[in-house]
Amino acid sequence: MRVLFVGDVFATPGLRAARAFLARERDAYDFVIVNGENAAGGFGLTRKHYRVLRDAGADVVTLGNHAFDQKETAELIEETPRLLRPLNYPPGTPGLGAGTYDVPGHGRICVAQVMGRVFMEPLDDPFRALDALLERLPDDVPLVVDVHAEATSEKKVLGWHLAGRAAAAIGTHTHVPTADATVMHGTAYVTDVGMTGVQGSAIGMAFDEVHARFRDFRKRRFKPAEGTATVHAVAIELDGVRARSVRRVVWRHGDDEPVRIHADDRTGGCDDGR
Ligand SMILES: [Fe+2]
């Protein structure tokens, strides 16, 4: 099974780039996951943005710490199992943190999202939430986890926690792609897939207001950066419930061809004797 994971789609330039990218690449994949938690100008996603991503070819859209920034999300997420928020929100939170989906000709796939707790809200334990999910997951269903976290160390350790148990652990949230894509004991891993948005920006926002805020600590309304967005994604090839390979895919909106970067085992891996 060929799975594409598209990194955090940020505001209108990111949405446009994601749509154009999927129009040309969607057919090369059996299942597509898109992180859409920054689609609404950086803060969550509305019904309209969800529709754009689904119509573009996303099978599942994931959220994150901005999951409920838009009022309508709590209602929308109850209507569809294809919009996921972090699994480790407390009991009673609207929507699902994991779902299992049919993939025509390839069986089923489970997608989940967890949120880290370092420099983020103190949600329930993401390790325990994943263990509980794995316990009830049928043996023949691959699991792809969106690891939405701030600290590189926490993401890396969540990846190692899933190594040999999940098909993929793909980092999101920090918006800057990392060069450590690898396969750890059959689990595709990257610390951060990177943002789908304007790269010359304060992780999606225009520099000016963020720059001023860092200098005088006064609150300001941030504006999404304008310009040409770049898509950051990873392409994962599954063999049953484990990953055979992972590649980073980078496409600047309008380019002839995406750049496809194969995993480099010198920068990642899991040399722990397991
Ligand atoms: Fe986030």
Image (spheres, grey):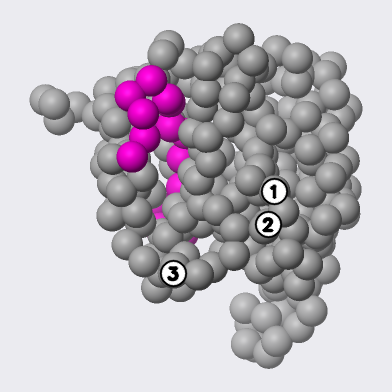
Would you say the residues marked 1 and 2 are in contact, meaning their CB atoms lie under 8 Å apart?
Answer: yes
Where in the figure is residue 105, as x and y percent of width and height? Answer: 60, 9
* Secondary element at image label 3: loop
Per the rendering, the mark at residue 77 is 2
Amino acid, disc 3: Pro
- Decide: is 262 above or below 212: above
Classify 10 Å Cα crowding around label 1: few (below 14), some (14-19), many (20 and above). Answer: few
Going 70% across and 48% down the picture, which residue do you hit? 80
Tell me if residue 146 is in the magenta stretch. yes
Q: CA separation, marks 1 and 2? A: 6 Å
Residue designated by label 1? 80
- Ligand 1 within 8 A of label 2's CB? no
Q: Quadrant of residue 122?
A: bottom left
Q: Is residue 8 visible?
A: no
Tag 2: Cα neighbours inside 10 Å, few (<14), some, or many (≥20)? some
Q: Is residue 243 magenta?
A: no
Kind of residue indicated by mark 2 = Ile
Q: Is residue 154 above or below residue 100?
A: below
Which residue bears the numbered disc 3? 90
Question: Start and end of the magenta stretch?
Answer: 136-152
User: As shown in the figure, which amino acid type bears the numbered disc 1?
Assistant: Thr
The Cα atoms of the two marked residues, 2 and 3, are separated by 16 Å
User: For residue 227, which numbered disc appears in the image?
Assistant: none
Relative placement, left or right, of 176 versus 219 is left
Query: Could you give the CA–CA distance between mark 3 and mark 1, rounded to whole angstroms?
Result: 19 Å
Residue 153 place in picture, x, y as percent? 33, 52
Which element type, helix, strand or loop, lies under badge 2? Answer: helix
Q: Secondary structure at mark 1?
A: loop
Horizontal and vertical percent for residue 248?
57, 26
Residue at 62% across / 54% down in the picture?
A: 63
